[in-house]
Image (tube, rainbow, N blue to C red):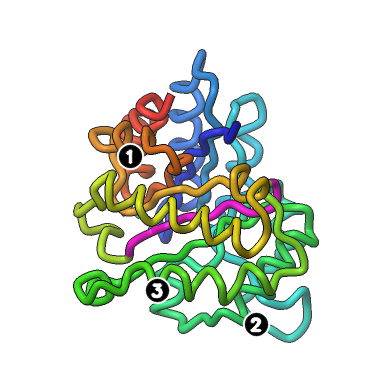
């Protein structure tokens, strides 16, 4: 049985003070809520402050990115090991905004995920097609290429150490959501691909999140799909009522 995961990706929002306010308000709203794993991914500088507050709340801490090296002369970078030291349990890797704005490559995703695993954390590996790919009928091909370029190359892939997140780029931050049917089709394809790369037990146990304009009003239908195991939530995770609404819809 795959445990539903609702993850908030705060992106470049919420410094330490605002992060503490937001996570406290999410934590209070989770009183009595059970059956779903909740994760927040604030900006790097807010991680230590949020880590102190989540003690006592059923909330895990994650980072939005990490370096593809473990240490050395890489000005401005933060290593997986450092993230683990400040309490992170998860790290998002290969978000489409990293692919697009920072030209990150498959080779760096492989290194990052291996480092996340080596530091004892879980990676959330993001993938998904752009609007032009979907219009050209190439969504499945893109998803296949992105998954096959990274997953079989990892030192280790298990349902415990890696979560997949299908995020159609055209649905991120646009208010446009994939229909549950569209999303389910890609999630099912992804699970079959994982079965082909590893085995069917691994595929059955691997969690695959949907991301892209998820909100309280569409979360229930999406998460009800057989192969959708939760959400990676951007905009709606910045407001505790909206984020809690998604968590409650997922239960
Ligand atoms: P969104 O972002 O919910 O604002 O569309 C999702 C994401 O980028 O992870």
- Disc 1/disc 2 C-alpha distance (Å): 40 Å
Residue 222 in the image: x percent, y percent?
A: 33, 39
| Quarter in which the C terminus is drawn | top left
Name the residue that disc number 3 marks.
142
Tell me the residue at 47%/53% (across/down): 15
In this view, the residue in front, 164 or 216, is 164
Residue 64 in the image: x percent, y percent?
A: 53, 59
Tell me the residue at 70%/59% (across/down): 157
Local crowd size for mark 3, using a 10 Å CA cut-off: few (<14), some (14–19), many (≥20): some
- Disc 3/disc 2 C-alpha distance (Å): 33 Å
Residue 83 in the image: x percent, y percent?
A: 69, 57
- Disc 1/disc 3 C-alpha distance (Å): 21 Å
Name the residue that disc number 1 marks.
222
Element type at mark 3: helix
Q: Does 41 sit left or right of 116 as displayed?
A: left
- Whichever of callouts 1 and 3 sits on the residue coming sooner in the sequence is 3
Local crowd size for mark 1, using a 10 Å CA cut-off: few (<14), some (14–19), many (≥20): many
Q: Is residue 44 at least partly visible in the picture?
A: no
Question: Which circle, 3 or 2, is nearer the viewer?
Answer: 3
Is disc 1 in contact with disc 3, using a CB cutoff of under 8 Å? no
Q: Does 241 sit left or right of 67 as displayed?
A: left
Q: Which portion, as a residue range, is magenta? A: 160-168
Q: Is residue 11 at least partly visible in the picture?
A: yes
Residue 165 in the image: x percent, y percent?
A: 48, 55
Name the residue that disc number 2 marks.
75
Q: Quadrant of residue 133?
A: bottom left
Residue 162 lies in the magenta stretch: yes
Element type at mark 2: loop
Above or below — where is 67 with respect to 123? below
């Amino acid at each position: 049985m795959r445990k539903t995961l609702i993850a908030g990706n705060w992106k470049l929002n919420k410094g330490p003070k605002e992060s503490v306010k937001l996570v406290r308000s999410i934590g209070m709203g989770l009183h009595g809520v059970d059956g779903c794993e909740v994760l927040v991914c604030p900006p790097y500088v807010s991680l230590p402050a949020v880590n102190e507050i989540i003690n006592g709340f059923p909330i895990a801490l994650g980072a939005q990115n990490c370096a593809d090296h473990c240490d050395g002369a890489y000005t401005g970078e933060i290593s997986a090991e450092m993230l683990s030291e400040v309490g992170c349990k998860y790290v998002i890797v290969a978000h489409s905004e990293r692919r697009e704005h920072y030209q990150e490559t498959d080779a760096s995703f492989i290194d990052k995920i291996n480092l996340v695993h080596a530091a004892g954390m879980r990676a959330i590996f993001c993938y998904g097609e752009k609007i032009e790919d979907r219009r050209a009928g190439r969504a499945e091909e893109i998803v296949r290429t992105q998954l096959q370029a990274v997953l079989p190359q990892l030192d280790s892939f298990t349902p415990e150490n890696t979560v997949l997140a299908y995020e159609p780029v055209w649905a991120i931050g646009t208010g446009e959501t994939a229909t549950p049917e569209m999303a389910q089709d890609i999630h099912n394809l992804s699970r079959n691909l994982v079965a082909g790369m590893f085995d069917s037990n691994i595929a059955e146990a691997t969690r695959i999140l949907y991301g892209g304009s998820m909100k309280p009003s569409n979360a229930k239908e999406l998460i009800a799909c057989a192969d959708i195991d939760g959400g990676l939530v951007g905009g709606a995770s910045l407001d505790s009522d909206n984020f809690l609404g998604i968590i409650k819809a997922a239960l």
